[in-house]
Amino acid sequence: MDLSFTPDQLALQKIAQEVVAKEITPYALEMDHNGKIKPDLLAKLNDAGFLNLPVPEEYDGPGLDAITISLIYEELGKGCAGVATTVAANSLASYPVIVAGNDEQKRYYFDKINNGALAAFALTEPGAGSDAGAVATTAVKDGDDYILNGTKCFITNGGIAEIYIIFANARKSAGIRGLTAFIVDRDAPGFSVGKEEEKMGIRASNTCELILDNVRVPATHRLGREGEGFRIAMRTLDAARPFVGAVSVGIAQAALDAASKYAKERIQFGKPIASFQLIQAAIADMAMQVEAARLLVHKACWLKDQGLPFSKEAAMAKCYASDTAMKVTVDAVQVLGGYGYIKEYPTEKYMRDAKIMQIYEGTNQIQRTVIANQILY
Ligand code: COS
């Protein structure tokens, strides 16, 4: 067992740390307040090479392994989980193409992503959240095209993406075996962006409703076979869940760092509160949980990189790391006391940002279901 990183992995981690320190952390509270990403930041994230992390080398991407990507996401998560979510949505949307795209589709999609386009993965609907198979958006074959009709909700990058992966049902009577994935351009006639959500956390990220009103999509933009969509979605979520874990570890580590720094500076009863054993116990527990979460994330990524089954470990990494982020950020607010609760300090933002990690890309109830099913059946 080798828990060390390669020189390339460490070099990319360092680049991520520098970009985060210069371009993200100083603006994190401003973006949180404004509820949007700084307009010039997307170009900087693209220059840093963060928008196409999993694109294979044969399609002119960096073709990074999952461990390296997780190291980058942890750094982004430390700086601002909203920015990390914006970047991670590009990876999420890329996996259906990696998993099921043909050569022509890969060239079409990855060309855009390599050139800085944002993408969005659109599975969720008002009536299809955890029950992903219940997608009501329809895809009806019409000559060489499909006609898509329906509404998607809670779509990350929904309002700012150029290209979308849309899941629709092409054979209603077949249930989840009718689910089919399509590449859809933003300028396709009939496609429009609906309301933008006002969120509790990850406020730098964009979350919108999408409306498909007789959107004509060429059959050449169908990923895989008709009815293969559910399997494509599940394989995509398996690949992406460790990265939710990585962002969660980043949030939790940032909260731990803030709590440790404050504990050493804050004087009460004539000495730094870091000298009190109850504070020490809190810091020690936070540190143990963050490290355990990080190791689970790296284990899931390592399994994926080895080409071994990793679905259970991906769910464990996502679930444990996001539960840890929630717990650690609540504890960090507690260590800072009243100061933890006000916006002058970063901990209240960490706490708000952590909550969604337990919800998106499959609630932690779903992760526990996935884990239990793999153990019991
Ligand atoms: N990889 C490949 N195939 C998978 C798979 C995986 N990880 N998980 C399930 N499948 C396949 C199964 O093998 C099965 O195929 P067959 O019918 O050919 O045997 C099919 O998909 C259906 O599987 P299952 O019966 O387990 O589906 P369920 O309807 O019970 O749902 C859960 C399974 C709950 C795990 C799934 O719906 C899920 O992950 N929901 C959460 C969705 C989500 O994360 N939403 C977040 C929004 S998207 S960002």
Image (cartoon, rainbow, N blue to C red):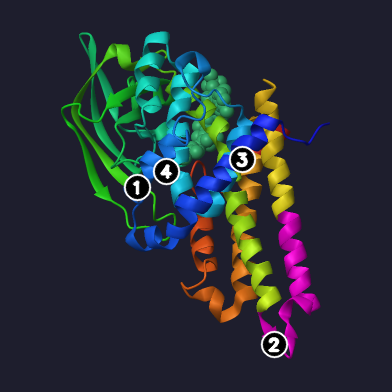
Which residue is labeled 1 in the image?
Answer: 207
Q: Is residue 119 above or below residue 247?
A: above
Question: Looking at the picture, which amino acid does disc 4 mark?
Answer: Thr
Pointer 4: what residue? 86
Q: Residue 251 appears in which quarter of the rendering?
A: bottom right
Residue 244 in view (yes/no): no
Disc 3 marks a residue whose amino acid type is Gln
- Mark 4 vs mark 2: in front: 2
Three-letter amino acid code of the residue under disc 1: Thr
Q: Do the residues labelled 1 and 4 touch (CB within 8 Å)?
A: no
The residue where tag 3 is placed is 13
First-in-chain label (1 vs 3): 3
Q: Which comes sooner in the sequence, label 3 or label 4?
A: 3
Identity of the residue drawn at 81% across and 32% down: 2
* CA neighbours of label 2 inside 10 A, class few (<14), some (14 to 19), many (20+): few
Question: Does label 4 or label 2 sit earlier along the sequence?
Answer: 4
Counting from the top left corner in percent of width and height, residue 166 is at 34, 29
Magenta span of residues: 266-289
- Find the distance from the CA under tag 3 to the CA under tag 2: 37 Å
Q: CB under 8 Å between callouts 1 and 2?
A: no
In the rendered structure, are the residues bearing label 1 and label 3 in contact, judged by CB atoms less than 8 Å apart? no
Disc 2 target residue: 268
**In the image, is residue 267 part of the stretch drawn in magenta?**
yes
Q: How far apart are marks 1 and 4 (CA)?
A: 10 Å
Q: Is 35 in front, or is 372?
A: 35
Which of pointers 3 and 2 indicates the residue nearer the eye?
3
Q: Label 1 to label 2, Cα distance in Å?
A: 43 Å
N-terminal-most mark, 3 or 2:
3
